Image (cartoon, rainbow, N blue to C red):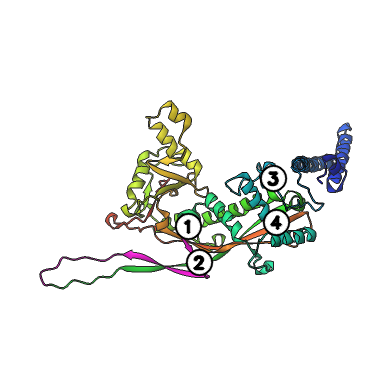
């Protein structure tokens, strides 16, 4: 059963924290009561103040956890769900419709048609973590593994951390993919290319057939469709998160829900960074994103076909930007790329600081428009998707907004499902477990148009951009 706060207060680490806080406070009172303190005492007081503040934060966090745990335990007790000494509820006969009332407020990332379905998915994922990933508590580990076997949660391989860990079962992988598509921008908007091996070569059309007028009885002139290739090479990406063993034992449903979010968010943040701002270095797995790819076409930004440069220079700000800058960006997009998938991509702060402000200032808005705003961000008739890895602080010659159909400009290679493993040594110095997730992917930007000093030779690609002017 869950311990009350008073019981935690008198036990283990928590009791030690409270004792140290009391001792520090007593010593500080003694120092402050002195009429003439030495330099050493002043230094000691500063150290004790800092240490005590940190300990108070830990104490309050433990109290909050104890209160929440007691509350949930009470709810489970009211639902006649018996909690085992190890922290596992009996699972036979569990009514997830009832259990969802206890856990629905914290289950946010597993989706279902009902709260009960979402709670059950989180519960099953938590049992998978306990049984096949986290080996920190052998008793919990073995009990959870048996539960998974009894409830048909199977893993396709169980390896050492060096070999890659445990592949996440398909039923949970779908949730992680859904979350990555919810948080990320590259994965759902680039052309997705499943990879069955380390490397995948895909064909790209670079030119079409040529047609000619011919005279009577004359032979046709042959032409061929032009192709080249794009190579995807899967890179391994790893995300690390920490959680406490106490939480793993006592609130694993909430932990499972939070871990799913943290793993998915960590992956998508790096995926988007590689796809949008990757500079080809090891930080980005050798990947070059759309922005560096476009800017790398020429040292003279005005010669790059797909970039609309801010019409009026305003050093250090966007104050001189006009809606015409964004109309001019749309104008650069080729007709073939103006598909139903065409949209704007920019940082949320940039959108509300520049184009949204320009639209409000343009007039024609009534009070209702200004009060309610738009349900979905739009700009000049096209949807806006926020990607927080893009620039938003003004610098010269920088791309701040992209527009077009990214599926025609870039490919996302997805090698395999997520692998999870825990670090068996992470508990050696603390009561925390490291959970490490890995995936393998590649993002290749293959069409951003060209650059030329001759305007008539400039050919934009399927994604174009708005950029700041030179300072």
Residue 237 visible somewhere in the drawing: no
* Disc number lying in front (4 or 3): 3
- The C terminus - image quarter: top left
- Point 45% across, 36% down: residue: 374
- Pinpoint residue 251: horizontal percent, then vertical percent: 73, 48
Which of the marked residues, 2 or 1, is nearer the chain's N terminus? 2
- Point 40% across, 41% down: residue: 379
- The residues colored magenta run 191-217
Q: Assign a secondary structure to mark 2.
A: loop
Badge 1 vs badge 3, beta-carbon distance below 8 Å: no
Q: Which residue is mark 2?
A: 195
- Pinpoint residue 38: horizontal percent, then vertical percent: 86, 38
Most distant residue in the front direction: 93
Give the spatial CA distance, label 4 vs label 3.
16 Å
Give the spatial CA distance, label 4 vs label 1.
38 Å
- Point 38% across, 49% down: residue: 340
Q: Is residue 206 magenta?
A: yes
Which of the marked residues, 3 or 2, is nearer the chain's N terminus? 3
**Label annotation for residue 127:** 4
Which of the marked residues, 1 or 3, is nearer the chain's N terminus? 3
Which of the marked residues, 4 or 1, is nearer the chain's N terminus? 4
Against 127, is 400 above or below? above
């Amino acid at each position: 059963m869950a311990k009350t706060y008073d019981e935690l207060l008198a036990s283990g680490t928590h009791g030690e924290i409270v004792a140290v806080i009391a001792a520090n406070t007593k010593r500080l009172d003694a120092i402050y009561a002195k009429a003439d303190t030495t330099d050493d005492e002043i230094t000691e007081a500063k150290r004790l103040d800092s240490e005590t503040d940190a300990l108070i934060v830990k104490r309050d966090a433990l109290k909050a956890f104890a209160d929440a745990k007691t509350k949930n335990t009470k709810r489970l007790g009211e639902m006649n769900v018996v909690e085992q000494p190890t922290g596992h509820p009996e699972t036979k006969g569990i009514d997830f419709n009832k259990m969802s009332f206890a856990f629905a407020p914290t289950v946010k990332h597993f989706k279902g048609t009902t709260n009960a379905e979402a709670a059950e998915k989180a519960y099953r994922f938590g049992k998978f973590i306990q049984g096949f990933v986290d080996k920190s508590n052998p008793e919990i580990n073995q009990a959870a593994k048996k539960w998974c076997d009894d409830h048909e949660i199977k893993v396709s391989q169980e390896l050492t951390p060096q070999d890659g860990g445990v592949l996440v079962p398909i039923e949970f992988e779908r949730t992680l993919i859904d979350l990555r598509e919810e948080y990320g921008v590259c994965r759902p908007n680039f052309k997705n290319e499943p990879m069955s091996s380390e490397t995948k070569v895909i064909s790209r059309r670079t030119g079409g057939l040529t047609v000619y007028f011919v005279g009577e009885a004359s032979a046709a002139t042959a032409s061929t469709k032009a192709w080249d290739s794009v190579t995807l090479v899967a890179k391994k990406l790893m995300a690390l998160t920490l959680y406490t063993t106490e939480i793993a034992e006592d609130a694993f449903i909430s932990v499972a829900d939070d871990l799913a979010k943290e793993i998915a968010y960590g992956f998508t943040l790096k995926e988007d960074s590689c796809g949008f701002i990757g500079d080809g270095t090891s930080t980005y797995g050798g990947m070059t994103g759309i922005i560096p790819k476009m800017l790398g076409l020429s040292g003279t930004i005005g010669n790059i076909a797909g970039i609309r440069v801010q019409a009026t220079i305003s050093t250090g700000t966007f104050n001189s930007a006009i809606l015409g800058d964004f109309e001019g960006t749309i104008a650069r997009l080729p007709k073939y790329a103006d598909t139903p998938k065409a949209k704007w991509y920019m940082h949320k702060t940039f959108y509300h600081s520049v184009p949204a402000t320009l639209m409000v200032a343009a007039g024609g808005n009534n009070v209702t428009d200004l009060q309610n705003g738009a349900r979905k961000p739009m700009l000049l008739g096209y949807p806006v998707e926020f990607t927080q890895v893009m620039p938003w602080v003004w610098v010269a010659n920088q791309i701040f907004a992209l527009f077009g159909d990214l599926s025609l400009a870039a490919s996302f290679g997805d090698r395999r499902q997520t692998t999870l493993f825990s670090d068996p040594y992470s508990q050696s110095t603390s009561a925390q477990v490291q959970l490490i997730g890995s995936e393998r992917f590649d993002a290749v930007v293959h069409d951003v148009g060209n650059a030329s000093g001759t305007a008539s030779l400039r050919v934009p690609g399927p994604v174009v951009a708005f950029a700041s002017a030179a300072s």
